[in-house]
Amino acid sequence: MPNPIIKQFVVEGSTAFPFALLNIDQCWPARAADAAAIADHASDADTRRKIILATAARYAPNRQGWIASGWRVID
């Protein structure tokens, strides 16, 4: 079985990270720094965080789900 092509996308937000969307979008933090940024929910509410996520190429981020959670997908 061939290896899937891994694609990355960036999400941005200042609220608590919507962990359920990792499962829905079948994605994961691309780097250790992104995993740490996800866990940093105690930061100032006005501080926007950008987190790089990775997914297999056949999956696309659920933009409406991210927006509903107070985050947005930026490319």
Image: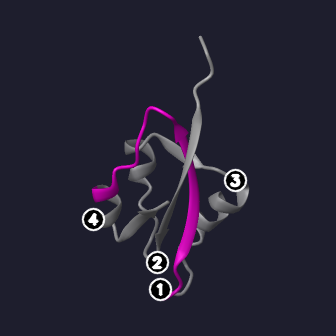
Nearest to N terminus: mark 2 or mark 3: 2
| Distance (Cα) linking label 1 and label 3 | 23 Å
| Distance (Cα) linking label 2 and label 3 | 19 Å
| Distance (Cα) linking label 2 and label 1 | 6 Å
| Distance (Cα) linking label 2 and label 4 | 13 Å
Nearest to N terminus: mark 4 or mark 3: 3
Which numbered dot is residue 24? none
**Residue type pointed to by label 4:** Ala
**Is-magenta flag for residue 49?**
yes
Give the position of the N terminus as an image quadrant: top right
Nearest to N terminus: mark 2 or mark 1: 2
Residue identifier under label 1: 45
Asked whether disc 2 touches disc 1, contact meaning CB atoms under 8 Å apart, the reply is yes
Query: Badge 2, how many Cα within 10 Å: few under 14, some, many 20+?
Result: some
**Residue type pointed to by label 3:** Arg
Splitting the image into 4 quarters, where does residue 59 fall?
top left
Residue identifier under label 2: 14
Point out the stretch of residues depicted in magenta: 46-64
Disc 1, SS = loop
Which numbered dot is residue 68? 4
